[in-house]
Image: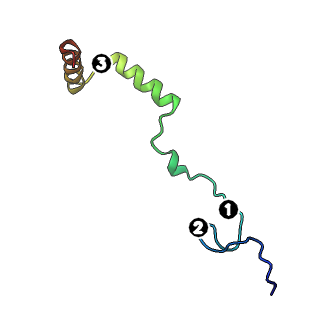
Amino acid sequence: MSNIRKYPVCVGRERGFKKTKNIRPKKPSNRRGRLTKQAKFARSLIREVVGFAPFEKRLLELLKNDKENGL
């Protein structure tokens, strides 16, 4: 065993033997819920045909009133 160390200090966060990180592939579950082009198009088409839901209409009305009041 030699007195010469590869790295001068073996204390703290980066202490000990240096290794390369094991890079793992991304999991498909991380992609879950992301909007695809097809889904985005389908939703926009349906919104165009059907219109807004009642609660969305109410929200738009409230936002419009807030802008008029200067809030």
**Residue receiving disc 3:** 51
The x and y percentages for residue 20 are 71, 63
Residue 13, numbered label: 2
| Rendered image coloring scheme | rainbow
Q: Which residue is mark 1?
A: 21
Q: Between marks 3 and 2, how big is the CA–CA gap?
A: 56 Å
Point out which mark residue 64 bears. none
**What amino acid does circle 3 point to?**
Gly
Secondary structure, mark 3, is loop
Quadrant assignment for the N terminus: bottom right
Left or right: 61, with 41 as reference point: left
Name the residue rendered at 79%, 83% in the picture.
Answer: 3
Left or right of 6 in this view: 42: left
Mark positioned earlier in the residue sequence (1 or 3): 1
Q: Nearer the viewer, mark 1 or mark 3?
A: 1
Residue located 21% across and 15% down the image: 70
Q: Amino acid at mark 2?
A: Arg
Few, some or many C-alpha atoms within 10 Å of disc 3 (few <14, some 14-19, many ≥20)?
Answer: few
Q: Relative to 15, does residue 60 appear above or below in the rendering?
A: above
Quadrant in the rendering for residue 44:
top left
